[in-house]
Image (cartoon, rainbow, N blue to C red):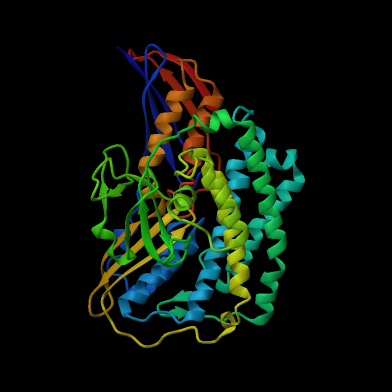
Amino acid sequence: MMTQKITIEPVTRIEGHAKVTIHMNDDGSVERAVLHINEFRGFEKFCEGRLYFEMPSITPRICGICPVSHHLAAAKAADELIGAPAPRPAVMLRELMHMGQIIQSHGMHFFELAGPDLLLGFDTNPAQRNVLGLAGANPALALKAVNLRKFGQEIIRILGGRRIHPNFAVPGGVNKTLLLAERDLILTGIQPAIEAVQTGLGIMKDWAERNAADINRFAVFPSGYMSLVTPDNGLELYDGAVRLVGASGLELEKFPASSYLDYIAERVENWSYLKFPYYKKMGWPAGVYRVGPLGRLNAVDHLSTPLANAEHIIFRSLNGGLPVENTLYYHYARLIEILFAIERVQALCEDGNILSSDILNTRKDYRGEGVGVLEAPRGTLFHHYKADENGRLTNVNLIVATGHNNWAMTKAVDSVAKTYITGPVVQEGMLNRVEAAVRAHDPCLSCSTHAVGQMPVQIDVISASGELLQTLRRD
């Protein structure tokens, strides 16, 4: 049977660059669809030879969307490498900055990146299906969305001096205390932020009710799920053990983050620069798992904050208490995590120790190796450094959050393409649904801030003999 190939390049409304190839049979069915991550990340190699204490400043340049995540993971790895655990007030301040990152990143994704699909429709003209179209359709909602992200960014700015690539965490602690006036300023933003998220939750639930048929056929598949957890298996975004549960929701492993190489391996495929992590004991592909909001809320038993925990109970009821497998529910999980982060900001700020000046551990027990792990907005992030006696790095290993979801994104693309593309005449809305399968995971693919400019898409449908059958273009 002859085949045709459709290429979507680049995938839009994500951070970084990727393409999708869809291989079709002559009868109009999809044979397979593949996600290609076609940019190269070289940080692991060109950080070799740098001094360990430079890493909290170097690694945030991996990404302009989640620099805080790399900044803090690098600092945690450096803490271990020199044997200088940060004092409790410093840990609290780092977590406060991290909550600001969760709020601003998740808020931007739900309202500005995924929002146009949910609020305007997958089939809306792409000239309107964007953040400007969303603002035109609902100015009040757009303002709430902007202010929610601003709240998270202000927390980062107050602590780190700037909203992007902050200068705050250092090996052994942080370099700045939180002033009383700064703490009080943060607290004034709590209630408006909660109200904005509750508005988003209402939108998501209403959309889910009206689009249940799509949710239940849009990339629904079993996998494992991974997250950091508290000792009693609650949601933990800054520190904790790694918990991996299976497709049934039963625990497979719970291990210290520093032992990750005993449990996680990475596979290489020839169509992508991004590796495919998996659980060693189950092997490939049985050991694949998902991370990020959906993965975390499936891997934990509860959330420690009341409003978010109440939503988590509803979330876990969606599949009768079993893990929620619906890819589009990543958006619901993302909103629940924003609510959790806001409540954690309030709890941290109301703890008097967060104003302490005990923010740096100057005692060292140099070990030469350290692993720093936290839950970035997109999933579990590992930084692993080895250094010589002079503190010069000899080996750097990074498993970036999006990497854990590489298999899931490819699986989702293949599933959605087979569900929605049923013939050689491809409508633009079908294209957008395939992109949305990637977008739901909120991938972060860049090795630095992404380029500003137009992101055109062109699909050429070409027969096996090379004849151009149809062209779809998005300028």
The residue under the point 52% across, 75% down is: 92
Quarter holding residue 5: top left
Q: In the rendered image of this protein, does residue 21 appear above or below residue 246?
A: above
The residue under the point 39% across, 79% down is: 85
The one of 222 and 90 positioned closer to us in this rendering: 222
Looking at the picture, how far across and down is residue 204, in whole percent?
63, 42
> In screen coordinates, is 461 left or right of 123?
left
> In screen coordinates, is 413 left or right of 271?
right
Looking at the picture, how far across and down is residue 7, in whole percent?
42, 28
Q: Residue furthest right?
A: 140
The residue under the point 62% across, 74% down is: 349
Looking at the picture, how far across and down is residue 212, in whole percent?
58, 31
Looking at the picture, how far across and down is residue 194, in whole percent?
68, 58
Quarter holding residue 460: top left
Quarter holding residue 308: bottom right
Q: In the rendered image of this protein, does residue 80 appear above or below residue 36?
A: below
Q: In the rendered image of this protein, does residue 145 appear above or below residue 210?
A: below
The one of 145 and 343 positioned closer to us in this rendering: 343
Where the N terminus falls, by quadrant?
A: top left
The one of 116 and 61 positioned closer to us in this rendering: 116
> In screen coordinates, is 437 left or right of 367?
right
The residue under the point 47% across, 21% down is: 421
Q: In the rendered image of this protein, does residue 127 appear above or below residue 170?
A: above
